[in-house]
Structures are given as structure tokens and as C-alpha cells.
Image: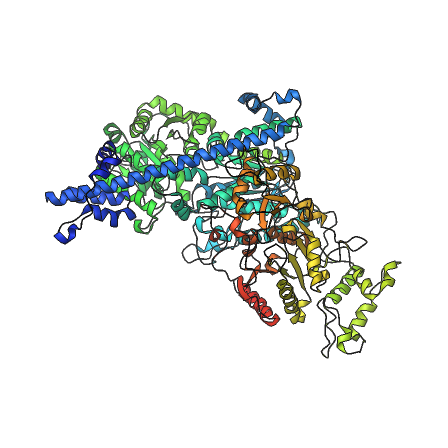
């Protein structure tokens, strides 16, 4: 409550007396209301303790001052003191809880770092063991490190123009368009929007870059402009070749708007989280289509995959991580603003508990998105060193010390035991200086007077509209202008600036103050935080009687911003950024480009900008006197002002977009490049006639030879049940004609084993999945208490198969897939026990998504199924089997808080039967002792280990699989590999399931939730208290989700499938 003078006196008195004294003096809780008296203590207990804020206290203070009756005044003062005491006690409690949390977190990080270094020290030589952690870190000076980094990298140059790269950028929230950006409209439409649009344009102009796609959300709402509903917007055409010809019709930079979430609503960023999976699926569909188009144009008919996927902010980082895993291409992350840093600041304020903060800002979901982004990212781009050390250093997935150790070991060729840390690099944001005209200093001339009409009576020159809007507030617009440009956010600290100006008489006499605070129509329609800032600004202007000295226009366009800088520069003014913490400070660079010296906060990015430009002064944003003194110094000392102006112009090229993009591409090129690679060729849309006929035979078998009539019966695997049909074994003529055209396999000894065996072996080298246009995925996590598959699932699977085949036309192009935590051997055994042939399924996703099988295609001589080798290499990113196995065994068998104990608890047992090369499986002996998934993942991240741990099979198993493997990601792989669109997949789930269950619900696929089928899942082991909630992952309502009873007949199941198709078509 520092800064609220009307509280300080009472607060100090209370603190001096101590809480115990207050408790002793507290009046007895008698009912004075009955005696016609008011009891402030009872009022405090009954009403005030439920929640007050400082504005409420201020209103009470105003009433106290206005009260004339001594008795009533005393009662109100007493009541107010109690309220202040309660707020103080609450703040102290929150501070204590935060200190405890930070201490525990520091201890966990130290323990994780100790474990990592112990494991990695085992394979060092005696000489290398002498390199302690501190020695590894301090072995290089900053200058040497900088020289080595530069010398090891090949700088991006014009000779890269033959590369023709495809780059994907993602920025989801806010309103994104190329022209007339509505910056400042709300807290989501700010500097990040401008940054990503200009980055897209600048990258598209670089040699070697063919196309840049900027993904954002498509919004068709009456609340906003129609342009945000356009699916595609061209930002710039591609570069031209040496002859001036365009390099390709699809080249250039584009905004690609993907529909996700409610189509007719503009949502703030905190509400977008449940729809991330839907965006990922839509973006994946666009990328696959574009890779094919670019392949035809520049790739020699081979797909052109994205060179890199770059996520901006937590929501886009989460999306980029999933897309990176689905496509197996590198990911880059820019955080812009970080959740843990904001959480720390809000907790320090002491006004809200962690639970309240999480509810308002979805903070824990945001932080988990940032942690996942760190897990996946090859490269993290920051604006300043401070962001790396003080902000990213707060995260489980990044440790500055461990990152340096791992980098040093990698250079020396020493095993890192599967530990990874993303590489952090500082690349300041670029600036477009094309519209900046650098004017050298000229003899003192009142240029503004010439524009507005001079003393010689000449007519004024035409003024930019925004100049008129600003100058109408000012009595004397010729005075130097102090310019502040930001949205009216409390952390931008505009009220302190106004106090500094209002209380410094020399500054008021010397200069005007201009506040460009976004766009507004009505303060009452703004968000509470922005409205409070604007209201306070207006009150302070009135308090200090600053009318005619402060300008605060209601509207401006993005195209007006350069003119605003020019106006301030012509008056020989100063630009100021007084934010409490500024992540970077793009406006400082813009101002410097227009010849404005700066006064800026010493917290954050302005420190690095000032070091590069040397064009102003840094101040403590909490010290209004320091702010006033710095402004007065720059405005009054003309030589200093001119020196700062020249320094800014001289060094500004360091922040140009070409320089930024050159550094960016140089850094990205140093990443480990990955893209989809198949051991077998991906089939085209057109196949050879023989292959087509062979596949047709399998299709005929899958269709169950439905060309027959007269009510013949079929078995579950779809083959004609001749015995049940009653004797006539004659096939229909249509089937005979198809079979007669099929070329039998040459000299195949298995041909003599019978007709059915022959049919199984006619399959082409590609799975039938590639010919399917619809896929029915059965992902019911239905197990008994021992983790064995429940027998009732057999009946449900049979009904789903029958439902699919009720519509013979749809069955012709429909396939089936089973998605389960069981290993393939157990899944096949279970299906066989229910007389369901495994060849009923086009795909088996087994071991929680760590393996994919295609029955009838990838098999050994004895018929044993083989996993898809391409999928195995696809999910191998950052997978460390041995390092994970050792660490997980130690973590799971050590009680919480007893990491140094010599007596392991042995709460898990390795399940070799369910393990494979990409899945470590354990039996859970006691679920009550098992660590929650988010707790286990946190400890692994602190040790540099990246994976996807989960509990499954009614909490009887724990399986650890690669970072970007899961049952949901396996479906995306089927889309990438076999082009079976996710929008044409139908996933059957229970009401609960394994801990990856939530990932399976949302997306562009259709989901059918079968009720009363799965009675016990594993979700109670997913999250600890205080984590994000299910509502942050799964939308409450969706037209793509339907519910169905577990007792439903095949007809009811078929109807739900039809209805879902219709509802999806109407979206």
C-alpha cells in the first residue's frame, strides 16, 4: 500500500502497536445494534473481511473526512483501522507463503542440478572431473564467448538465395492485420502484433526465404472489423530475381487465419487455451496443403516442409510445440511476456492469492504452455540478457548453470546422458526505418511556427491530422514535448510520470506533456485496469491544474505514430518510457530513429538499448523526483540533447529489420535441422494399375463383399459367412469380375494355403489407411482394478464395427483404429479373445502412442506385427531411454522431501512386458505414493530431462514415452504420413481415462463420449493442487463433441456419427 498517503498514518500506528495489542483491545462482540448503536467490530467480522480493495478504503476515508459528528467519525475511523489491519495481515500471510514457496523451489532446483551433475560426472576422466560446475561456467570471459559464438556460425548472406525456405510464425491472440493495426485497442493488441507482422514482411525479403506464413485466429464477429475474418491476407510479395521477375506465385509473406473456438466471438487470450488443439489441427492441415503446393512449384514434386516453426507468446509456443512434434521440424520460441515473471510481481503486490491470480489470468495454464515450449524449442530468442537470467531463469525447464555445463560438454564430445537445455540468444527486435527521414541539425528555426502560421502573416502549412488532435489540448504547442506512448496499463506507470510533471514547477514551465494511451470511445466500456489508469490520469490533471499543458487524444491510427514522433522531435522534446518493468522497449528505438532522446526505466530491456544507442538517461521508475530531474536535464541542456539525438541516429542501424533477420536466420541455421523423412516413399494420389487392383481386392475384403443381396450374414471381420447364409457359395457376378482382373502374386508358396490366406497377402506395401477418407478411432480406457482390459469393451467394439458397416456407402471408405495404453501383444490377445480379428483395424496405436502398427501391411514371415519405423524415428526427438530410466526409478522410489534418503520406498516395479524402445513402463504398487504427473515432470525438467510421463490402466501403470509422443499426436502423424484428415476422424472415449485423456477430446476431429463405460480412470494422478484445471484444456461446449450411452445399439451409434458430420459441416 505504499504511496497511499491517506492510509500510511493509520497503518504505521497499527504496525507499531502490533497485532497482539489490537487483539487485546478488540471490543467484545456485543450486539450494540439493539441499543441503537453501530458496532464497527461486528461489521468488520460480518462484511469487511469478505473482501475489500484500496479504492473502497479511499471512499471510506473521504466519508470520514466529510463526517461532522464526532461519534460517527470515531466509529468510521475505528472501522477503517480494522479493515487496514486485516489487509495488512492478509498481505503478510501471502508474503510468508510466497517466501516458503520460493525457498522450496530453490531447494528443488539445487537438488535437480546436483543430481544432473552427479550423473554426468560418472563418465568424465580424472582430469575432467576437476572441472567443477563453477569452473565450467566461469572458464570463459564474455568477450571470448562472444568471439567463439560468432566464429562458429556462418553468417547468413546473399549467396543463400537459392535455398527457398518456408517459414511459419504463430501469434494467436489479439487482432492481427497488415494495415491500420488497432494497437492499444485492448491489452492483447499491442507491440507483439506489430512485431510479428513486420518480422513476417522482413523475413520474406531476405535472400533464401521463399514464403512466410503468419498464423493467427480467424474471427467473424460484429464487434470487430470484417478484415479479421478473411482467411488469407497478403503482407508482401516475394522477392524478384535478377531480371526483375517474381520468383513464384506463392512466394511472399501472408497472414493465415485459422478458425478455432467460437467463430462469432472475439476472445481475450486467457480464454483461448481450451481451443489450442483445434488450432493445431487446422494449422497442420494448411501446412500440409502448402507443402504440397510449394513442392510442385519449387521442390521438384517433393513436399517442402517448414524450415522452422516460430511461436510468439505462451499460447503460440504451446501450439508450435505440438506442430513441431507432428511435423518433426525445429521450433523457435519468443516469449514476449512471461507468466512466471508476472506471477511473481502479482504475488509481491499482496492483493491477490495465487488461486485468485490463476482464476483471473489462467496463469498456471500459461506457465505450463511456456514450460512445454522450453521442452521442445531448439532456440529461444530474447530481447535482453536480463530476460534470460531473471525471467527464463524462473522456469523448471531452463537453468542457466546447467545450460552452460551441457553446452561445454557438447563441445568437448562428452555424453550428456539425454539431458537438454534450449539455446537462449539475444536478438533485439527490428525496426522499419523506411518512413524515417533523418534530418541533420539546422540553425535554430521555429519550424512549428512556420507550420502553424508565422509572425510574417504567411498562411500555415498543411498539418498532419494527429498534430491538430494533439495541439488542440495545448495552450502553447511551441514548448518542448515530453512524449509517452503506451496503453493505459498500471505497469506502464503513467500516473507516476504525471505526478513527476505536476509537482516539478520548472518542468511545467519548460515543457508540455503528451500521453498517447491507445484508443478509446468511452472509459466506462474499457477493462477495469485501463479504466482506472485513465480515471486517475484525469484526476491528477485536475489536481495539479495541468489544463493546457497535457495532451491526451482519444484516437490515433498506427500510421499516425511516425507523425507523433516527428512532432515531438520538431519541438526538441524527449521520449519517456517510465514502465515499472519493460521487457524490451520497441518505442524507444522508434523514438530514437526520429531524433528523440530518451528517458527510460532502468528495469529490463532499456538497459541494453541505452548501451547500444547511448541516447538518453535511465531512471528508477518508482522515483518521481529522479524522473523529473532526468527530463529537466535533457530538455534544458541543449548540447546534451543534440549529442543524444546524434548518437541515436548513428547507432540505430543495429536495430534494423535486415540486421535482425540476418542474425535470426544465422542462429536458426545453426539448429539441428529436422523434417519428415520416410523409409518408404509416400504414395501419391495416383498409383499404378496393378497396385490399384491389389488394393481394391483388400477393399473388397474389407467391404465384406457387400455386393451380394438376399440377406446373407457376415462375420465380425466382414467376410461372408457362407455357412450361416445357408448353402449357396456362389459369389455375385460383380465380385467375380473384380477378382478376375487381379494379378496373383507370382510363385508365392503361401498361395496354396487357402483362399483367405491369399487374400491377406495381396496387400500392397502401403497400408489401406492411405485410401481411407474417414477413420473411426476407439480409444476407450476401459480396465478393471488390476489394469486388465474389461471384457465389456469387446461388446462395445463389436457394436462400433457393426455401426460403421450399416451404411455400405460410407463403409467403403471408412477405416478403424484402436488407440490404447496396452502393448501390441496384449491388445491383439484381447481382441482375439473376443473373436475380433486384428485385421479389422487399419491401425493400432499402442503403448500410449509410442508405437503405431498397420495390421496386414507391416508383418514378419510368421505374421507378427511390426511397428511403423517412420513413426519411431518421428518421435525420437530428445528421447533418452537410459538417463530417464535411472532418474525416474530414483524419483519415484524416494518419498517427497527425502531425496537424500538411503532407504528407497520401492513404490514402482518395472513392467518389461509393456516396455519397448520408446516406452518405459512401470507397475504402480501403491497409487497413494505415486507422484502426480505435473510434479514428476517438474523434477525431470529441473534435471534437463524431456519426456511425456503418464499414468494409465486405472492408475496401475506409469508409462514414460518421448516428449512429443502421445495418442493424440499419433493421430496427427497419420494425417502427415497418410494424408487422412483429422477433421474426418471420429474418436470414441469414455467419461474419464488415462492421464492423456484430455488431449484426446478437443481438436478438429469429432469426439463421442460413451457414458457409464469407464468407471475409474487415472486422472486423479494428473495434477497437484494449485495447477491448471481441466477447463483450461477442454472447452465446456463444442459442436464436435457428442455423448452416447455405453449400452447404445449399432443403430444409435451410426446416428450419432451422422449427426456429428452434419453439425461439423454447419460450422
> In this rendering, would 652 be left or right of 915?
left
- Residue toward you, 880 or 432: 880
Q: Looking at the figure, which quarter contains the N terminus?
A: top left
Residue furthest toward the left?
69
Residue furthest toward the front?
903
Q: Residue at x 32, y 40 (%)?
A: 90
Number of numbered discs visible in the structure rendering: 0
User: In the image, residue 481 lies at what x, y percent?
Assistant: 32, 33
Quarter assignment of residue 645 = top left
| Colouring | rainbow
User: In the image, residue 850 lies at what x, y percent?
Assistant: 65, 48
Residue 92 appears in the figure: yes
Residue 748 appears in the figure: no
> In this rendering, would 202 be left or right of 490?
right
Quarter assignment of residue 1050 = bottom right
- Residue toward you, 722 or 451: 722
User: In the image, residue 390 lies at what x, y percent?
Assistant: 46, 32
Quarter assignment of residue 686 = bottom right
User: In the image, residue 619 lies at what x, y percent?
Assistant: 36, 28
Q: Residue at x 19, y 41 (%)?
A: 78
Compared to residue 801, the image places residue 950 above or below, namely above
Amino acid at each position: 500500500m505504499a504511496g497511499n498517503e491517506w492510509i500510511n498514518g493509520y497503518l504505521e500506528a497499527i504496525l507499531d502497536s502490533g497485532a497482539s495489542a489490537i487483539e487485546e483491545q478488540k471490543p467484545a462482540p456485543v450486539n450494540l445494534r439493539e441499543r441503537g448503536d453501530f458496532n464497527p467490530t461486528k461489521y468488520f467480522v460480518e462484511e469487511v473481511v469478505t473482501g475489500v480493495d484500496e479504492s473502497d478504503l479511499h471512499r471510506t476515508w473521504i466519508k470520514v473526512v466529510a463526517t461532522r459528528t464526532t461519534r460517527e467519525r470515531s466509529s468510521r475511523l475505528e472501522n477503517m483501522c480494522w479493515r487496514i489491519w486485516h489487509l495488512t495481515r492478509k498481505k503478510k500471510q501471502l508474503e510468508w507463503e510466497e517466501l516458503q514457496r520460493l525457498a522450496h523451489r530453490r531447494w528443488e532446483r539445487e537438488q535437480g542440478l546436483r543430481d544432473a551433475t552427479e550423473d554426468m560426472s560418472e563418465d568424465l576422466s580424472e582430469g575432467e572431473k576437476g572441472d567443477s560446475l563453477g569452473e565450467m561456467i566461469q572458464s570463459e570471459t564474455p568477450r571470448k564467448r562472444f568471439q567463439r559464438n560468432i566464429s562458429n556460425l556462418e553468417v547468413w548472406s546473399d549467396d543463400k538465395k537459392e535455398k527457398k525456405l518456408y517459414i511459419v510464425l504463430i501469434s494467436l491472440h489479439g487482432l492481427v492485420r497488415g494495415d491500420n493495426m488497432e494497437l492499444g485497442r485492448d491489452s492483447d493488441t499491442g507491440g507483439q502484433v506489430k512485431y510479428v507482422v513486420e518480422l513476417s514482411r522482413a523475413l520474406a525479403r531476405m535472400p533464401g526465404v521463399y514464403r512466410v506464413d503468419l498464423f493467427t485466429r480467424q474471427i467473424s464477429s460484429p464487434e470487430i472489423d470484417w478484415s479479421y475474418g478473411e482467411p488469407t491476407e497478403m503482407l508482401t510479395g516475394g522477392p524478384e530475381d535478377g531480371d526483375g521477375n517474381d520468383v513464384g506465385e506463392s512466394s511472399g509473406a501472408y497472414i493465415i487465419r485459422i478458425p478455432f473456438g467460437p467463430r462469432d466471438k472475439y476472445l481475450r487470450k486467457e480464454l483461448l487455451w481450451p481451443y489450442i488443439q483445434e488450432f493445431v489441427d487446422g494449422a497442420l492441415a494448411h501446412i500440409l496443403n502448402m507443402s504440397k503446393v510449394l513442392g510442385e512449384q519449387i521442390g521438384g514434386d517433393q513436399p517442402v516442409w517448414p524450415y522452422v516453426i516460430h511461436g510468439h507468446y505462451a499460447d503460440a509456443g504451446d501450439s508450435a510445440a505440438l506442430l513441431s512434434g507432428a511435423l518433426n521440424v525445429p521450433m523457435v520460441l519468443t516469449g514476449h511476456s512471461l507468466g512466471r515473471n508476472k506471477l511473481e510481481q502479482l504475488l509481491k503486490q499482496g492483493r491477490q492469492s495465487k488461486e485468485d491470480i490463476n482464476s483471473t489470468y489462467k496463469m498456471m495454464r500459461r506457465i505450463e504452455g511456456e514450460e512445454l515450449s522450453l521442452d521442445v524449442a531448439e532456440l529461444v530468442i530474447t530481447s535482453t540478457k536480463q530476460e534470460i537470467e531473471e525471467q527464463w531463469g524462473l522456469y523448471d525447464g531452463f537453468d542457466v548453470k546447467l545450460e552452460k555445463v551441457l553446452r561445454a560438454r557438447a563441445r568437448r564430445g562428452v555424453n550428456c546422458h539425454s539431458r537438454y537445455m534450449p539455446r537462449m540468444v539475444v536478438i533485439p527486435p527490428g525496426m522499419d526505418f523506411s518512413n524515417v527521414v533523418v534530418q541533420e541539425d539546422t540553425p535554430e528555426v521555429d519550424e512549428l511556427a512556420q507550420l502553424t502560421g508565422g509572425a510574417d502573416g504567411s498562411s500555415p502549412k498543411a498539418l498532419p491530422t494527429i498534430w491538430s488532435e494533439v495541439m488542440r489540448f495545448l495552450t502553447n504547442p511551441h514548448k518542448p514535448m515530453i512524449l509517452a506512448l503506451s496503453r493505459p496499463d498500471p505497469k506502464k506507470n503513467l500516473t507516476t510520470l504525471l505526478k513527476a510533471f505536476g509537482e516539478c514547477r520548472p518542468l511545467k514551465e519548460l515543457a508540455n506533456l503528451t500521453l498517447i494511451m491507445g484508443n478509446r470511445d468511452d472509459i466506462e466500456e474499457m477493462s477495469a485496469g485501463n479504466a482506472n489508469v485513465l480515471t486517475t490520469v484525469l484526476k491528477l490533471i485536475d489536481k495539479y491544474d495541468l489544463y493546457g499543458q497535457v495532451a491526451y487524444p482519444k484516437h490515433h491510427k498506427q500510421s499516425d505514430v511516425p507523425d507523433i514522433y516527428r512532432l515531438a522531435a520538431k519541438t526538441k522534446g524527449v521520449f519517456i518510457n517510465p514502465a515499472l518493468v519493460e521487457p524490451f522497449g520497441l518505442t524507444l528505438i522508434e523514438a530514437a530513429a526520429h531524433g528523440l532522446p530518451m528517458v527510460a526505466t532502468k528495469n529490463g530491456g532499456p538497459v541494453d538499448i541505452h548501451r547500444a544507442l547511448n541516447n538518453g538517461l535511465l531512471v528508477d521508475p518508482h522515483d518521481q523526483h529522479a524522473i523529473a530531474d532526468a527530463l529537466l536535464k535533457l530538455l534544458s541542456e541543449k548540447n546534451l540533447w543534440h549529442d543524444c539525438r546524434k548518437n541515436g541516429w548513428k547507432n540505430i542501424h543495429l536495430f534494423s529489420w535486415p540486421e535482425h533477420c540476418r542474425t535470426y536466420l544465422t542462429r536458426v541455421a545453426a539448429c539441428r535441422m529436422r523434417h519428415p523423412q520416410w523409409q518408404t516413399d509416400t504414395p501419391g494420389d495416383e498409383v499404378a494399375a496393378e497396385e490399384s487392383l491389389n488394393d481394391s481386392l483388400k477393399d473388397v475384403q474389407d467391404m465384406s463383399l457387400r455386393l451380394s443381396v438376399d440377406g446373407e450374414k457376415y462375420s465380425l471381420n466382414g467376410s461372408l459367412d457362407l455357412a450361416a447364409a445357408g448353402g449357396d457359395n456362389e459369389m455375385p457376378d460383380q465380385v467375380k469380375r473384380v477378382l478376375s482382373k487381379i494379378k496373383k502374386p507370382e510363385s508365392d508358396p503361401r498361395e496354396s494355403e487357402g483362399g483367405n490366406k491369399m487374400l491377406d497377402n495381396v496387400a500392397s506395401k502401403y497400408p489401406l489407411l492411405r485410401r481411407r477418407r474417414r477413420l473411426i478411432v476407439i480409444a476407450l480406457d476401459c480396465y478393471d482394478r488390476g489394469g486388465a482390459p474389461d471384457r465389456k469393451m469387446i461388446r462395445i467394439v463389436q457394436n462400433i464395427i457393426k455401426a460403421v458397416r450399416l451404411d455400405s456407402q460410407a463403409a467403403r471408405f471408412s477405416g478403424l483404429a484402436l488407440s490404447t495404453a496396452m502393448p501390441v501383444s496384449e491388445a491383439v490377445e484381447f481382441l482375439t479373445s473376443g473373436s475380433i480379428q486384428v485385421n479389422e483395424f487399419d491401425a493400432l496405436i499402442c503403448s500410449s502412442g509410442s508405437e503405431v502398427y498397420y495390421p496386414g501391411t507391416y508383418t514378419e514371415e510368421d505374421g507378427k506385427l511390426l511397428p511403423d519405423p517412420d513413426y519411431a524415428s518421428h518421435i525420437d526427438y530428445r528421447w533418452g531411454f537410459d538417463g530417464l530410466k535411472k532418474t525416474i526409478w530414483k524419483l519415484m522410489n524416494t518419498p517427497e522431501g527425502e531425496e537424500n534418503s538411503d532407504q528407497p520406498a520401492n513404490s514402482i516395479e518395472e513392467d518389461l512386458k509393456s516396455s519397448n524402445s520408446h516406452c518405459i513402463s512401470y507397475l504402480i504398487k501403491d497409487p497413494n505414493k505415486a507422484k502426480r504427473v505435473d510434479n514428476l515432470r517438474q523434477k525431470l525438467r529441473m534435471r534437463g530431462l524431456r519426456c511425456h510421463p503418464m499414468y494409465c490402466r486405472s492408475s496401475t501403470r506409469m508409462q514414460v514415452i518421448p516428449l512429443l509422443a502421445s495418442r493424440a499426436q499419433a493421430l496427427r502423424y497419420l494425417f502427415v504420413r497418410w494424408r487422412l484428415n483429422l477433421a474426418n476422424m471420429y474418436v470414441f472415449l469414455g467419461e474419464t481415462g488415462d492421464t492423456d485423456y484430455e488431449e484426446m477430446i478437443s481438436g478438429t476431429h469429432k469426439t463421442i463420449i460413451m457414458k457409464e463405460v469407464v468407471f475409474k480412470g487415472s486422472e486423479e494422478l494428473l495434477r497437484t493442487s494449485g495447477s491448471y484445471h481441466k477447463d483450461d484444456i477442454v472447452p465446456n461446449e463444442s459442436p464436435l463433441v457428442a455423448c452416447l450411452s455405453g449400452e447404445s445399439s449399432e443403430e444409435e451409434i451410426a446416428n450419432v456419427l451422422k449427426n456429428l458430420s452434419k453439425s461439423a459441416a454447419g460450422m
